Amino acid sequence: MDNFTFHNPTKMIFGKGRIKEIGKEIGNNNINKVLLLAGGGSIKTNGVYEQVTNSLKENNIEWLESWGVRPNPSLEHANKVSELISANKLEAILAVGGGSVIDEAKSVAAGIYVDNIWDIFEGNAQIEKALPIFTVLTLSATGSEMNSFAVLSNDKEMKKWSFGSPHVYPKVTILDPSVQNSLPWRQTANGGVDSLSHLMEYYFMGLDAEVTFGINESLQRTVIQEIDKLMVNQNNYNARANYTWSSTLALNGISGVAMGGGEWTVHGIEHSLSVMNPEIAHGEGLAVIFPAWIKYVWEVKPEIFRKWAKNVWEADSVEDAIQKMKDKFTSWNAPITLRELGFTKSDFSRIIEITFNYGRVGKIKNLKKEDMFNILDLAY
Ligand code: NZQ
Ligand code: ZN
């Protein structure tokens, strides 16, 4: 088994009725004035905003608000938020929302200390510090609430890229699963696909880390099982709680210990789809590409893919597991073809160009442009 360092400094406060603890947590970090960052307004209709602001008031934390972080957040908006923070000398960011709000918070928290936020994503600026980040999570999918990664879209350059830095782990995250009852079903399903995808990106890079294989397989089975339960009843608290915690663990490091850093090729291809059309949710793109990618590459590493087929899907072959996964996504009303996402074959060359713009594509199998064409064709 490979050597590894595991360190995750985010304090997780989990459970029903716990959002009221956020003000005290911020105060405990000697912070008096924060930016409350949010998306398009869902937190106003499901009561989260009220719970958060009551807690800030009770703990004498001052705040300014910035709204309008879009799904697949943009560099343009992050730049505006950054100016607001600098102009008002705010001490920390409180991100209230899903992965997009948290990712934009991380980008700004680190970006405020460099000349240009995008330099971080290009690897042209060193991150030496960041503003403290606190999060109240309202959508379990990305794991951003307990990890050191952020993804941002530079629409002008057609780049949806990521960075990672230990400085942007949230200090504290509050995860009350019950506030996710207000999610449209599509977002719950997308979350399930994303969580499962994080687990698979690590799993297929594994060799001999049996502990991690065991944890990872168990998380994959739990995600599938609990999303199935939520499909029957979206207000099932135990299903929501088990799913949301699995989703956090899918990308907080634990499910990828000694797994070679993960594969992440399907994520790279998906990011090209959602930068071309930001209306496409991350989970939707993954549901389309993952089965096709597995079909194309599994024979390079047959033992690991067969282990996955058997232990996660109770399937006799990898082909059978792929079919079961596609059927599952369809039963969740997730798309499984590029056509359903509105792409035509004439888009392939652009998708390939954007993906290769990032650099090398593929670890288990180094993909050439024609390989990627074949994968897109399988996903079509
Ligand atoms: O904007 P609001 O009004 O809040 O509505 C959001 C948004 O429209 C809504 N929503 C969130 N919580 C809700 C709710 N609606 C009702 N009730 C609630 N409780 O859901 C919509 C989608 O939200 P978004 O934050 O965009 O979704 P998600 O959490 O899936 O984040 C996706 C972004 O994260 C990136 C993705 O690429 C994408 O840009 N990722 C970040 C990662 C990371 N930081 O580690 C890893 C991932 O692989 C991923 O790439
Ligand atoms: Zn993802």
Image (cartoon, rainbow, N blue to C red):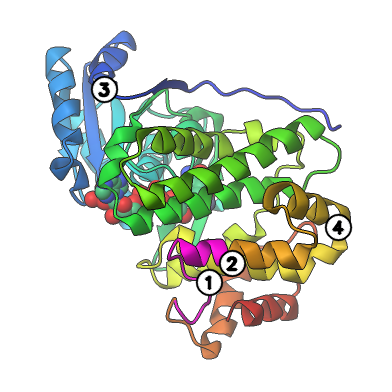
The circle drawn on residue 336 is 1
Q: Earlier in the sequence, mark 2 or mark 4?
A: 4
Few, some or many residues within 10 Å of mark 3 (<14, 14–19, 20+): some
Alpha-carbon distance for marks 3 and 2?
36 Å
Q: Residue furthest bottom?
A: 346
Residue 33 image position (x, y, % from top left): 21, 22
Crowding at mark 1 (Cα within 10 Å: few <14, some 14-19, many 20+) = many
Label 3 – label 1 distance at C-alpha: 37 Å
Q: Secondary structure at mark 1?
A: loop
Q: Earlier in the sequence, mark 3 or mark 2?
A: 3
Q: Which residue is mark 2?
A: 326
Q: Which residue is mark 3?
A: 17
The Cα–Cα distance between marks 2 and 1, rounded to whole angstroms, is 7 Å
Mark 2 touches mark 1? (CB < 8 Å): yes
Q: Residues within 10 Å of mark 4 (few under 14, many from 20)?
A: some
Query: SS for tag 4?
Result: loop
Q: Is residue 74 above or below residue 206?
A: below
